[in-house]
Image: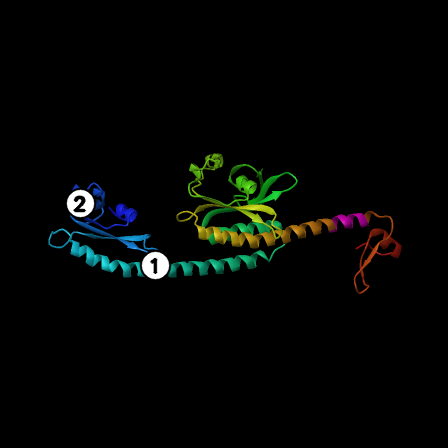
Amino acid sequence: VLGQVAKSGQGVNVVDAYSDPLFNPKVDERLPGRTRTLLCMPIVSSKSPDKVVAVVQLINKVGDLPFTEEDAQEFRAFSDPIGIILESCQSLYTAARNQKGVAALLKATASLGQSLNLEATLRTVMDQARDLLKADRSTIFLICNETGELWTKVATADETKMMEIRIPANKGIAGYVASTKQILNIPDAYQDPRFDPSTDRKTGYVTRNILCMPVFNSDGKLIGVTQLINKQAGVFTADDERLLAAISAQAAVAIDNAQLYERVRGMKGYLEGILQSLSNGVVTVDVQGRVASVNRSAARIFGREAG
């Protein structure tokens, strides 16, 4: 009966519940007494009169009488204020939830800027995304341009070290998102043909729902994919998509900085190796003209230790 009212948007007055094909007798197993008469009315949105936001139900009119048309009209008069109250509560709930989301996003943004270590950055991204969206698991895959693979580093079971995982950039859910650059919000993983359940079979873990999103750098280039698994309550929503997009944008900046730092550090080591191998003496100075470094040959010329 409730479903019919919600679907049609029309009230229903049931004179004899057990003779009505819409009535589900199992309802009485959870309620005291026996349902005889029902009056159900839709509560519609004040902004969209065609949208049903709730259904109110009255059971068993006092005196063992059926509900009348006058009862229905009087009950209908209550529906408008009930709808306004419900929408006001929903608006307050949404505002409070968004405020918590913004606070968590600011916290995540601040923590992402504190490290130039790529492994630490990846782990921070995963932890913050998981906590912010209340998911069970969170992974961010980066694209390896040399091999065309998606890779990430995750902690081992005892969390003593990080382990690298690599998958083809065109396989599975993450590969599909990397290939198409589209967001995937999958409410039921096992009903989606792109989902590969082999990992679940190996680990015993059951994937229920997935939110997967491409990550772009400041130049608009795809650098990775963020994947969240199993929302703790329900499925991933449009609000979750917006929050993940926001944290992914901040994460992209942090990842860019970490990767740039790794490249600069690698180039510095490479250049230092070349300088040390030269037979000529090389001295570098800073902008004030002070000696910053010398190679081994220069140290020998000056009669000093290379350190």
- As drawn, the residue found furthest toward the bottom would be 288
* Outermost right residue: 301
Crowdedness of circle 1 by 10 Å Cα count: few (<14), some, many (20+)? some
Q: Nearer the viewer, residue 71 or 36?
A: 71
What residue lies at 88% left-to-right and 57% top-to-bottom? 302
User: Is-magenta flag for residue 271?
Assistant: yes
Q: In this picture, is 18 found above or below 265?
A: above
Q: Amino acid at mark 2?
A: Ala
- In the image: residue 48, left or right of residue 141: left
Residue at position x 71%, y 49% in the image: 266
Q: Disc 2 and disc 1: Cα gap in Å?
A: 31 Å
Residue, x 20% and y 42% (percent of image)? 25
Q: Which residue is mark 2?
A: 17
Q: Is residue 31 left or right of residue 304?
A: left
The range drawn in magenta is 268-275
Q: Which mark is residue 130?
A: none
237 or 117: nearer the viewer: 237
Tag 1's secondary structure? helix
Q: Is residue 150 magenta?
A: no
**Quadrant containing the C terminus in the rendered view:** bottom right
Across and down, in percent, residue 232 comes to 42, 48
Tell me which label, 2 or 1, sits earlier in the chain: 2
In-front residue for pair 109/15? 15
The residue wearing badge 1 is: 87
| Residue 7 position within the rendered picture, expressed as x and y whole percent measured from the top left | 30, 46
> Residue flagged by tag 1: what amino acid is it?
Glu
Q: Position of residue 182 (x, y in %)?
A: 52, 44
Q: Find residue 295 and report its horizontal and vertical position in percent.
A: 82, 53
- Farthest residue to the front: give it: 49
Question: Residues at badges 2 and 1 in contact (C-beta under 8 Å)?
Answer: no
Q: Is residue 131 left or right of residue 164?
A: left
CA neighbours of label 2 inside 10 A, class few (<14), some (14 to 19), many (20+) = many
